[in-house]
Image (cartoon, grey):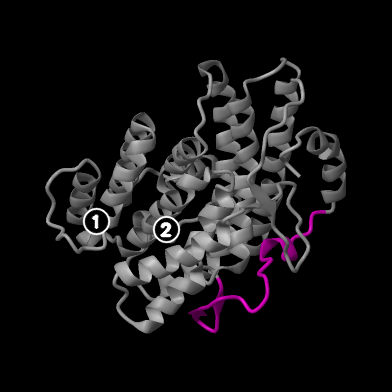
Amino acid sequence: MTKQSYSSRSQPVHHSKPWQSLFSPRLHHLGDAVCEIDNAYLIDRWGFPSKAAEKFFVDMDLSRWSVLVLPEILNSRIQLVTRFLTVLFLIDDNMDYETGQEYVVNLKALVVGEKTSFTANDPNMIISEIINELDKFNHGKTNEVKTGVSQFWDFQVDRSRPSIKTLDDYLVFRVTETAMNVTHTLARLGMDLEIPAEEEHWLKKLEHITTYHIIIVNDLYSWDKELLQASNSKTTDIGGDLVSAITVVMKEENVDEMTAKKFLATKVHDLEVEYFDLVKEREKEGPMAIDARRYADCLPVMAAGNESWSRVTARYNVVNGKRMKPVEENLDFRAKFVNGYENRLRCRVKGLLKSWCCVP
């Protein structure tokens, strides 16, 4: 594959503590402004029940997830895409099995423009407004977003969950549950990409690798939050048990919590290396279309952005039984499990990192 360049809209992310992943985070160059506008808009429109809830929303910094995960989106589309994904976070927090079925029926009707029980001033109407605006940019990809988000909502309230016995089973299960297919479609729509059909199979492999990375990093960071919520609720996930990559590995490998976390920390590194190995194999086959290249470049940035956000959000940081914004960056598993072979891995991919101009 010949070296190709394109104009990057993003900027490097500077952390107060060392960055250890082989994937490097980027921030949309309008990211701070987008987050500020989005927070003010949603505080006004969403209808949080208290000032404390408003503050926690700001401390979670949900909008920053999008500007870190999708930093190359066109300026004209970044606010809409960010708001859409932030509202998905808020809807997800409102979802439960008891009221979820009716809620989902109304949400699905909303995205396709059908009649719902929502009033004109209902905050859920934001979804319909954003869908209508996205449709003006790309009707086909907006329809893919509608389909993906409908499947995501159906999945959230489906009681017939599959049997989860292995980490592989769990990762496949979580792909839909995390709505990453929606995020991938929004990336293509937001970056205005048209990817040749012959590149899709290879890029799909990269999607799976980076999505699995996001899922595992999410589960490692959110473990204390999940334990806290489980202790405060009689209902948990699949089959009445708290299910995450950690508990799945504990059962599959017959190990304790810390050993399972270490296993998953190693898996995160393995996925990073696997990404670069696939890139290397693809390079041998010859040049690719620039949009395919841009999309391949954005996938590890998605994974890095998710981890970068996880360091600073109040969503996952539990102190004395309460979620709050970290006083300093939360390194979580990166601090606890420093892999002895990390330097060797870095040397292995050093040449690849240099050859891919938009992956720092």
User: Where does the N terminus fall, quadrant-wise?
Assistant: top right
Residue 60, how many percent across, how many down? 50, 69
> Does residue 265 sit above or below 211 in this rendering?
below
Say whether residue 94 is left or right of residue 341: left
Q: Amino acid at mark 2?
A: Thr
Element carrying mark 2: helix
Numbered tag placed on residue 181 in the rendering:
none
- Magenta span main SS: loop
The residue at the point 33 percent across, 71 percent down is: 44
Residue range of the region highlighted in magenta in the rendering: 317-339
Q: Is residue 331 magenta?
A: yes
Q: CA distance from mark 1 to mark 2?
A: 14 Å
Say whether residue 231 is left or right of residue 156: right
Please give the count of numbered marks on the rendered protein. Answer: 2
In the picture of the structure, the residue carrying the numbered disc 1 is 125
Q: Amino acid at mark 1?
A: Met
